[in-house]
Amino acid sequence: LVDEIRQVLSDAIKAGGTTLRDFSGTDGQPGYFSQSLFVYGRESEPCLQCGSPVKRRIIGQRSTFYCPVCQQ
């Protein structure tokens, strides 16, 4: 898990971060890592890995999206 977290973080940094709304980096450019997200903002849409509907949970005023099949 630690290795995967490091890899995702490294990939996100290389892509300039994740622009979800009006965020931009210090150079004024948006981040493009959001194009790599498999479930974020895709509630009820099919998971890109297995096709199961993506679920959304609100935890502490924040939304969390997950695939109930792939992410157990």
Image (cartoon, rainbow, N blue to C red):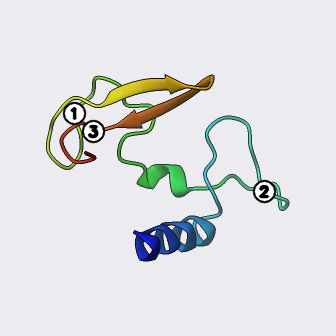
Residue 24 as seen in the image, left or right of residue 63: right
State which tag comes first along the sequence, 1 or 2: 2
Q: Measuring 57% from the left and 56% from the top, which residue is drawn there? A: 32
Q: Position of residue 65 (x, y in %)?
A: 41, 34
Q: CA distance from mark 1 to mark 2?
A: 31 Å
* Residue under label 3: 67
Q: Quadrant of the C terminus?
A: top left
N-terminal of the pair, mark 1 or mark 3, is 1
Please tell me which residue lies in front, 22 or 11.
Answer: 11
Tally the marks: 3
Badge 2 amino acid:
Gly
Disc nearest the viewer among 1 and 3: 3
**Viewer-side residue, 4 vs 35:** 4
Residue at figure coordinates x 53%, y 57% from the top left: 33
Give the labeled residue for mark 2.
Answer: 25
Numbered circle sitting on residue 46 = 1
Q: How far apart are the two marked residues, 2 and 3, measured between alpha carbons?
A: 30 Å
Where is 22 relative to 31, above or below?
Answer: above
Left or right of 9? Residue 46 is left
